[in-house]
Amino acid sequence: MKGKYLPEGVPQRAQETPAPVPGPAPTPSSAASVSSDSSISSGPSVSPNPSISLDPLISSGPSVSSGSSAPGSSASVSPAPRRRWTLRTRLVVSAVGLIAVVGAVIGAVTTIALHSYLQGQLDGELKDSVMRAQAPRPHDPMRSGTTLDFVAMGGQPLGTVGARVGPDGTIDVGAKLSNATRRLPSERLAALTVEQAAALDAVPRDGAPHTTELPGLGDYRVKSAKDGALVIGLPLGGVEATVGRLVVIEACLTVAGLVAAGIAGSTMVGIALRPLRRVAATATRVSELPLHQGEVALHVRVPEPEADARTEVGQVGAALNRMLGHVGSALSARQESEMRVRRFVADASHELRTPLASIRGYAELTRRGREQPGPETRHALGRIESEAERMTGLVEDLLLLARLDAGRPLSYESTDLAPLVVDAVSDARVAGPGHRWRLELPDEPALVHGDSGRLHQILMNLLANARTHTPEGTTVTARLRGTGSGPGSGPHHGRGVVRLEVQDDGPGIPADLLPHVFERFARGDASRSRAAGSTGLGLAIVQAVVAAHGGTVGVASVPGRTVFTVTLPTAGPVRAALAPS
């Protein structure tokens, strides 16, 4: 039966979708290269983007390379979105940063103060050394009579330097206290080099202490006597070592304090934001509720401890509770309004069935009476019967939709879709002889768990929709096939499904109507005009019945190809024979 016309005649081949025709490959003589400076060469090259055709680039001017954009080009690369920090991270980073700044300021002030204090002490010692050198003790047993014996006097620290200034104002000789264990001063001293003596000679002789660097010895605090006859310097190495140790200690303590502050701050902020997370969890649970349809019981609320208006988080929780209360009231009112409308539609449809049947019966009785009516009367009776029949179909559709909306149970049983498709296509061929009808069925039964009457109605509505909204001569194909399982992210993941497709090569559905084709009373425009009337409820009934069977329905349409696809779960384990050939 697969791939044949239903009516007797010539067999028809299965309709195949033409494969896309690949474009001509660029030849070396016509290929263009896209360089980094947006220039086009005539030799063969490889485009930096394989997905971009080279011909449009050649015809439209300079192209955009992978690394830069050509002037005047409309192509632009949007910057990657910056990663936003969480509130917890921002609070912890801000607190740690503030602590780091405060610690740095305190450390700098402490270091400067200690350096000033130690340098002041050293300046005091330097002043005492100068005073001792200017007024040496006359009975000092350690005096050797040398001109530099003041450098090795008692009380001078190791590393002290000194020099005598000659009559011409330059330093004649200088020495450094290098050994404090020898007895004679001359044995304790070491002569200064020419560079060191020159550095001492460059120090201003104003009687104030100055910092200078002696080559090979480091920084010294140097002071001259009031008369400028001698110069004494004490090393700054002890001061610098003490300040350096202080800086290292401060840095270690600051790093340890920042780590501890970060851990403690993260914990404290996490505890403080815990109520806010519970508020967010409540909002998330509300967002996961199916609020768009059906009866909604919106009982989710923020707990009372997190809705205390005396705290900032409590104000957010209280506002969310008030909003949920308003939303719940609105949803209840909407549900009540929908229920009233559904009850009205169901009651009205049920009550209209009897009057419509009576109208049709009386019209047919009048037309078949003993007295032959005139032409105008016969035409009027025919119109009454046709309109009553159309109204009856509309009432039946509305009543069916009302029952499906109310959740009326269907008569589920194991049903083979293949005979239903055959019967539906046979009826459609009789109703639309101007169309070409095709049928594609699998070799094995396509079993689903459903209501055979409603499934047959799905087929009739889809085929009637294709027949009504396409011109004569259109080919309509009813295709039935099965697959091993549903899509990986769909509702039938891991389950066997049967797909029913109704395809036509008509003018297609307008793009603005395509998202609304399954809505009630949705109608097409003039491009899908029809000879017979339509209630606009056929596809809405299809969607409602398919949803009642746990399936899905979709449509894809372009000019020349429109496909309605119905996916239903199978009645049992999927057979390998159901796979399409």
Image (cartoon, helix red, strand yellow):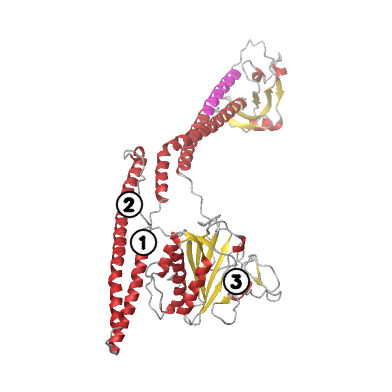
The residue depicted at 28 percent of the width and 82 percent of the height is 366
Q: Amino acid at mark 1?
A: Arg
* Magenta segment boundaries in residue numbering: 114-134
Predominant SS along the magenta part: helix
Judging by the rendered image, the residue that carries numbered circle 3 is 62
User: Along the horizontal axis of the image, is 241 left or right of 81?
Assistant: right
Q: Is residue 117 magenta?
A: yes
SS at mark 3? loop
Residue 321 position (above or below residue 103): below
User: Along the horizontal axis of the image, is 419 left or right of 231?
Assistant: left
The residue depicted at 31 percent of the width and 38 percent of the height is 310
Q: CA distance from mark 2 to mark 3?
A: 56 Å
Residue 211 position (above or below residue 74): above
Q: CA distance from mark 3 to mark 1?
A: 64 Å
State the residue in front, 323 or 539.
539
Q: Amino acid at mark 3?
A: Pro
Judging by the rendered image, the residue that carries numbered circle 1 is 403
Quarter the N terminus occupies: bottom right
SS at mark 1? helix
Question: Neighbour class for label 2 at 10 Å: few (<14), some, many (≥20)?
Answer: some
Residue 44 position (above or below residue 163): below
User: Along the horizontal axis of the image, is 520 left or right of 14?
Assistant: left
Q: CA distance from mark 2 to mark 1?
A: 27 Å
Residue 396 position (above or below residue 254): below
Farthest residue, direction right: 187
